[in-house]
Image: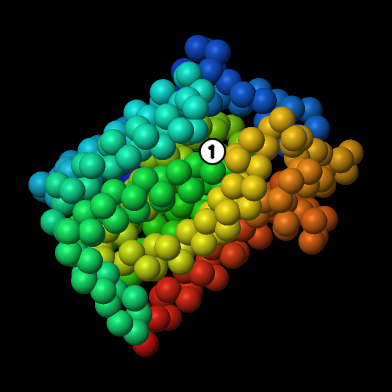
Amino acid sequence: MITAIIGFLISLVLTPYIASLMRKAGVVGRDIHKLDRPEVPEMGGLSLLISLPLSLVAVLNGDLAKALLVFLAFGVIGVLDDITNLKQSHKVMLSLLVSLGVLALPLDTNVNLLLFSIELGVLYYLFSILFVTGAANLVNLLAGFNGLEVGTSVIALFFLGLATSGDAQILAFTGVAVGLGFLWWNKYPAKVFPGDTGTLSLGALIGVVGILGKVELFTAILLLPHFLDFLLKTRIRFKGRPLGKTEVFEDGTLKAPPYLSFLGIIMRMKKVKEYQLVAIVWGIETFLGIIVLLHQLL
Protein backbone atom coordinates (compact mmCIF):
# COMPACT_ATOMS: atom_id res chain seq x y z
CA MET A 1 0.00 0.00 0.00
CA ILE A 2 1.65 3.20 -1.23
CA THR A 3 0.12 5.36 1.52
CA ALA A 4 1.79 3.18 4.15
CA ILE A 5 5.21 3.46 2.52
CA ILE A 6 4.87 7.23 2.20
CA GLY A 7 3.59 7.52 5.78
CA PHE A 8 6.46 5.51 7.21
CA LEU A 9 9.11 7.53 5.37
CA ILE A 10 7.59 10.91 6.26
CA SER A 11 7.23 9.96 9.92
CA LEU A 12 10.71 8.43 10.10
CA VAL A 13 12.32 11.60 8.71
CA LEU A 14 10.04 14.18 10.30
CA THR A 15 10.06 12.86 13.88
CA PRO A 16 13.73 13.67 14.70
CA TYR A 17 13.27 17.11 13.11
CA ILE A 18 10.22 17.80 15.32
CA ALA A 19 12.17 16.48 18.31
CA SER A 20 15.04 18.88 17.60
CA LEU A 21 12.63 21.81 17.36
CA MET A 22 11.03 20.86 20.67
CA ARG A 23 14.42 20.59 22.34
CA LYS A 24 15.45 24.03 21.05
CA ALA A 25 12.17 25.45 22.32
CA GLY A 26 12.72 23.89 25.74
CA VAL A 27 9.73 21.55 25.40
CA VAL A 28 11.38 18.64 27.15
CA GLY A 29 10.62 16.19 29.93
CA ARG A 30 12.62 13.95 32.19
CA ASP A 31 12.73 10.25 31.34
CA ILE A 32 12.03 9.27 34.93
CA HIS A 33 12.43 5.53 34.39
CA LYS A 34 16.15 5.87 33.72
CA LEU A 35 18.72 6.16 36.50
CA ASP A 36 20.27 9.27 34.94
CA ARG A 37 16.84 10.80 34.14
CA PRO A 38 17.83 12.27 30.74
CA GLU A 39 15.93 15.15 29.14
CA VAL A 40 13.83 14.03 26.17
CA PRO A 41 11.89 16.27 23.74
CA GLU A 42 8.12 16.25 24.29
CA MET A 43 5.17 16.76 21.92
CA GLY A 44 6.73 14.55 19.25
CA GLY A 45 3.18 13.55 18.37
CA LEU A 46 3.13 16.61 16.13
CA SER A 47 4.98 14.41 13.66
CA LEU A 48 2.01 12.01 13.61
CA LEU A 49 -0.43 14.88 13.03
CA ILE A 50 1.56 15.96 9.97
CA SER A 51 2.59 12.56 8.58
CA LEU A 52 -0.80 10.83 8.47
CA PRO A 53 -2.69 13.49 6.46
CA LEU A 54 0.23 13.98 4.05
CA SER A 55 0.48 10.26 3.37
CA LEU A 56 -3.24 10.03 2.55
CA VAL A 57 -3.44 12.99 0.16
CA ALA A 58 -3.33 10.80 -2.96
CA VAL A 59 -6.33 8.69 -1.88
CA LEU A 60 -8.26 11.27 0.11
CA ASN A 61 -12.03 11.16 -0.20
CA GLY A 62 -14.87 12.62 1.82
CA ASP A 63 -14.98 9.92 4.49
CA LEU A 64 -11.21 9.78 4.97
CA ALA A 65 -11.12 13.58 5.22
CA LYS A 66 -13.79 13.53 7.94
CA ALA A 67 -11.95 10.80 9.84
CA LEU A 68 -8.72 12.79 9.61
CA LEU A 69 -10.45 15.87 11.00
CA VAL A 70 -11.41 13.94 14.12
CA PHE A 71 -7.84 12.63 14.41
CA LEU A 72 -6.42 16.15 14.04
CA ALA A 73 -8.94 17.67 16.46
CA PHE A 74 -7.82 15.25 19.16
CA GLY A 75 -4.25 16.20 18.34
CA VAL A 76 -5.15 19.84 19.05
CA ILE A 77 -6.55 18.81 22.44
CA GLY A 78 -3.29 16.98 23.05
CA VAL A 79 -1.29 20.09 22.21
CA LEU A 80 -3.39 22.11 24.66
CA ASP A 81 -2.89 19.45 27.31
CA ASP A 82 0.86 19.28 26.77
CA ILE A 83 1.15 23.07 27.01
CA THR A 84 -1.36 23.86 29.77
CA ASN A 85 -1.81 20.53 31.61
CA LEU A 86 -5.59 20.42 31.23
CA LYS A 87 -7.74 19.12 34.06
CA GLN A 88 -8.95 15.58 33.39
CA SER A 89 -12.57 16.75 33.34
CA HIS A 90 -11.75 19.46 30.79
CA LYS A 91 -9.90 16.94 28.64
CA VAL A 92 -12.91 14.63 28.61
CA MET A 93 -15.35 17.45 27.82
CA LEU A 94 -13.21 18.67 24.92
CA SER A 95 -12.91 15.07 23.72
CA LEU A 96 -16.68 14.68 23.70
CA LEU A 97 -16.99 17.94 21.78
CA VAL A 98 -14.58 17.02 18.98
CA SER A 99 -15.94 13.46 18.85
CA LEU A 100 -19.11 14.98 17.40
CA GLY A 101 -17.18 14.94 14.13
CA VAL A 102 -17.66 11.19 13.91
CA LEU A 103 -21.36 11.83 13.22
CA ALA A 104 -20.36 13.10 9.77
CA LEU A 105 -19.18 9.61 8.85
CA PRO A 106 -21.55 7.07 7.22
CA LEU A 107 -22.75 5.29 10.36
CA ASP A 108 -24.28 1.83 10.44
CA THR A 109 -26.33 1.72 13.64
CA ASN A 110 -26.12 -2.06 13.96
CA VAL A 111 -23.45 -3.43 16.37
CA ASN A 112 -22.10 -6.96 15.86
CA LEU A 113 -21.56 -8.85 19.13
CA LEU A 114 -20.16 -12.11 17.69
CA LEU A 115 -23.10 -14.46 18.24
CA PHE A 116 -25.74 -11.81 17.66
CA SER A 117 -26.10 -8.16 16.76
CA ILE A 118 -27.96 -5.23 18.27
CA GLU A 119 -29.69 -2.46 16.36
CA LEU A 120 -29.10 0.68 18.41
CA GLY A 121 -30.89 3.09 16.12
CA VAL A 122 -30.52 6.70 17.22
CA LEU A 123 -28.59 5.57 20.33
CA TYR A 124 -25.71 4.58 18.06
CA TYR A 125 -24.89 8.24 17.49
CA LEU A 126 -24.31 8.72 21.21
CA PHE A 127 -22.46 5.41 21.34
CA SER A 128 -20.08 6.46 18.55
CA ILE A 129 -19.22 9.74 20.32
CA LEU A 130 -18.53 7.95 23.61
CA PHE A 131 -16.62 5.21 21.77
CA VAL A 132 -14.12 7.57 20.14
CA THR A 133 -13.80 9.66 23.31
CA GLY A 134 -13.18 6.53 25.34
CA ALA A 135 -10.60 5.10 22.92
CA ALA A 136 -8.64 8.36 22.85
CA ASN A 137 -8.54 8.78 26.61
CA LEU A 138 -7.82 5.11 27.33
CA VAL A 139 -4.71 5.16 25.14
CA ASN A 140 -3.71 8.44 26.77
CA LEU A 141 -4.06 6.85 30.22
CA LEU A 142 -1.95 3.70 29.70
CA ALA A 143 1.28 5.55 29.07
CA GLY A 144 4.60 6.73 30.46
CA PHE A 145 7.16 4.18 29.27
CA ASN A 146 9.36 4.23 26.17
CA GLY A 147 7.43 2.92 23.17
CA LEU A 148 4.43 1.78 25.20
CA GLU A 149 1.64 3.99 23.88
CA VAL A 150 2.76 4.10 20.27
CA GLY A 151 3.69 0.42 20.18
CA THR A 152 0.34 -0.81 21.53
CA SER A 153 -1.49 1.56 19.17
CA VAL A 154 0.47 0.25 16.18
CA ILE A 155 -0.38 -3.35 17.12
CA ALA A 156 -4.07 -2.50 17.62
CA LEU A 157 -4.26 -0.66 14.29
CA PHE A 158 -2.49 -3.52 12.50
CA PHE A 159 -5.04 -6.10 13.61
CA LEU A 160 -7.92 -3.71 12.96
CA GLY A 161 -6.51 -3.25 9.47
CA LEU A 162 -6.62 -7.02 8.94
CA ALA A 163 -10.20 -7.12 10.22
CA THR A 164 -11.55 -4.30 8.02
CA SER A 165 -11.66 -3.19 4.40
CA GLY A 166 -12.04 -0.03 2.34
CA ASP A 167 -11.39 3.35 3.94
CA ALA A 168 -11.09 1.87 7.44
CA GLN A 169 -8.33 -0.48 6.29
CA ILE A 170 -6.46 2.29 4.47
CA LEU A 171 -6.66 4.47 7.58
CA ALA A 172 -5.55 1.64 9.87
CA PHE A 173 -2.56 0.42 7.82
CA THR A 174 -1.38 3.95 7.07
CA GLY A 175 -1.65 4.68 10.79
CA VAL A 176 0.47 1.59 11.46
CA ALA A 177 3.18 2.81 9.09
CA VAL A 178 3.21 6.35 10.48
CA GLY A 179 3.32 4.92 14.00
CA LEU A 180 6.24 2.64 13.12
CA GLY A 181 8.20 5.58 11.74
CA PHE A 182 7.67 7.41 15.02
CA LEU A 183 8.34 4.30 17.10
CA TRP A 184 11.85 4.02 15.66
CA TRP A 185 12.70 7.13 17.67
CA ASN A 186 10.36 6.49 20.60
CA LYS A 187 11.40 2.92 21.41
CA TYR A 188 13.76 2.27 24.33
CA PRO A 189 15.82 4.36 24.93
CA ALA A 190 13.46 7.05 23.67
CA LYS A 191 14.79 10.00 21.71
CA VAL A 192 11.36 11.67 21.72
CA PHE A 193 8.07 11.41 23.63
CA PRO A 194 4.68 11.54 21.85
CA GLY A 195 3.09 13.61 24.58
CA ASP A 196 -0.68 13.80 24.88
CA THR A 197 -0.50 15.24 21.35
CA GLY A 198 0.39 11.77 20.12
CA THR A 199 -1.48 9.52 22.53
CA LEU A 200 -4.87 11.23 22.26
CA SER A 201 -4.71 11.39 18.46
CA LEU A 202 -3.64 7.74 18.12
CA GLY A 203 -6.39 6.64 20.50
CA ALA A 204 -8.94 8.63 18.51
CA LEU A 205 -7.65 7.02 15.30
CA ILE A 206 -8.23 3.56 16.79
CA GLY A 207 -11.76 4.56 17.77
CA VAL A 208 -12.56 6.05 14.36
CA VAL A 209 -11.27 2.93 12.56
CA GLY A 210 -13.47 0.84 14.83
CA ILE A 211 -16.55 2.87 13.93
CA LEU A 212 -15.77 3.28 10.23
CA GLY A 213 -14.84 -0.39 9.81
CA LYS A 214 -17.75 -1.73 11.90
CA VAL A 215 -15.42 -3.59 14.27
CA GLU A 216 -16.48 -1.94 17.50
CA LEU A 217 -16.30 -5.14 19.56
CA PHE A 218 -12.85 -6.07 18.20
CA THR A 219 -11.62 -2.58 19.00
CA ALA A 220 -12.94 -2.93 22.54
CA ILE A 221 -11.12 -6.27 22.90
CA LEU A 222 -7.86 -4.67 21.75
CA LEU A 223 -8.32 -1.92 24.34
CA LEU A 224 -8.91 -4.32 27.24
CA PRO A 225 -5.52 -3.60 28.90
CA HIS A 226 -6.27 0.10 28.71
CA PHE A 227 -9.77 -0.40 30.12
CA LEU A 228 -8.45 -2.52 32.99
CA ASP A 229 -5.96 0.22 33.79
CA PHE A 230 -8.81 2.74 33.73
CA LEU A 231 -10.89 0.67 36.16
CA LEU A 232 -7.99 0.26 38.58
CA LYS A 233 -7.19 3.96 38.52
CA THR A 234 -10.79 4.97 39.23
CA ARG A 235 -10.11 3.84 42.81
CA ILE A 236 -7.61 6.68 43.22
CA ARG A 237 -9.59 9.08 40.99
CA PHE A 238 -6.67 9.18 38.53
CA LYS A 239 -4.51 11.08 41.04
CA GLY A 240 -1.57 8.70 41.19
CA ARG A 241 1.23 11.25 41.31
CA PRO A 242 0.52 12.54 44.83
CA LEU A 243 0.47 8.93 46.09
CA GLY A 244 3.86 8.05 44.61
CA LYS A 245 5.36 6.91 41.33
CA THR A 246 7.22 4.03 39.75
CA GLU A 247 10.79 3.91 41.07
CA VAL A 248 13.93 2.60 39.40
CA PHE A 249 16.38 0.39 41.31
CA GLU A 250 20.13 0.53 40.74
CA ASP A 251 19.97 -2.54 38.48
CA GLY A 252 17.41 -0.80 36.27
CA THR A 253 14.43 -2.86 37.41
CA LEU A 254 11.19 -1.13 38.31
CA LYS A 255 9.35 -0.85 41.61
CA ALA A 256 5.58 -0.60 41.22
CA PRO A 257 3.85 2.58 42.42
CA PRO A 258 1.93 2.36 45.74
CA TYR A 259 -1.44 2.03 44.02
CA LEU A 260 -2.99 -0.53 41.69
CA SER A 261 -2.62 -0.12 37.94
CA PHE A 262 -2.35 -2.51 35.02
CA LEU A 263 1.38 -1.92 34.68
CA GLY A 264 1.83 -2.03 38.44
CA ILE A 265 0.33 -5.51 38.57
CA ILE A 266 2.90 -6.72 36.02
CA MET A 267 5.71 -5.14 38.04
CA ARG A 268 4.48 -6.88 41.17
CA MET A 269 4.26 -10.25 39.42
CA LYS A 270 7.68 -10.11 37.75
CA LYS A 271 10.90 -8.17 38.25
CA VAL A 272 11.27 -6.22 35.01
CA LYS A 273 13.22 -3.41 33.42
CA GLU A 274 11.42 -0.76 31.40
CA TYR A 275 11.91 -2.34 27.98
CA GLN A 276 10.83 -5.73 29.38
CA LEU A 277 7.64 -4.24 30.82
CA VAL A 278 6.81 -2.66 27.47
CA ALA A 279 7.55 -5.92 25.63
CA ILE A 280 5.14 -7.78 27.93
CA VAL A 281 2.36 -5.30 27.20
CA TRP A 282 3.09 -5.51 23.48
CA GLY A 283 2.84 -9.30 23.81
CA ILE A 284 -0.53 -9.05 25.55
CA GLU A 285 -1.80 -6.68 22.86
CA THR A 286 -0.57 -9.05 20.13
CA PHE A 287 -2.32 -11.98 21.83
CA LEU A 288 -5.59 -10.04 21.88
CA GLY A 289 -5.05 -9.16 18.22
CA ILE A 290 -4.59 -12.84 17.32
CA ILE A 291 -7.88 -13.63 19.08
CA VAL A 292 -9.58 -10.97 16.96
CA LEU A 293 -7.96 -12.28 13.78
CA LEU A 294 -8.86 -15.90 14.49
CA HIS A 295 -12.49 -14.95 14.92
CA GLN A 296 -12.39 -13.18 11.58
CA LEU A 297 -10.98 -16.30 9.91
CA LEU A 298 -13.48 -18.72 11.48
Position of residue 53 relative to residue 85, above or below, is below
Crowd rating for badge 1 (residues with CA inside 10 Å; few <14, some 14–19, many 20+): many
From the top left corner, tell me how far across and down residue 96 is, in percent.
Answer: 32, 40
What kind of colouring is applied to the model shown? rainbow
Residue at position x 46%, y 52% from top?
A: 153
Say which quadrant the N terminus sits in: bottom left
- Say whether residue 226 is left or right of residue 99: right
Position of residue 111 relative to residue 241, above or below, is below
Frontmost residue, 109 versus 12: 109
How many numbered discs?
A: 1
Whether residue 61 is visible: yes
Residue at the extreme left: 62
- Classify mark 1: helix, strand or loop: helix
Whether residue 148 is visible: no
From the top left corner, tell me how far across and down residue 246 is, in percent.
Answer: 75, 40
- Say whether residue 140 is left or right of residue 96: right
From the top left corner, tell me how far across and down residue 10 is, in percent.
Answer: 35, 38
Say which quadrant the C terminus sits in: bottom left
Residue at the extreme top: 25
The quarter holding residue 36 reads: top right
Frontmost residue, 131 versus 189: 131
The quarter holding residue 120 reads: bottom left
Residue annotated with mark 1: 185
- Say whether residue 213 is left or right of residue 18: left
Query: Which amino acid type is marked by label 1?
Result: Trp
Position of residue 18 relative to residue 187, above or below, is above
Residue at position x 39%, y 57% from top?
A: 157
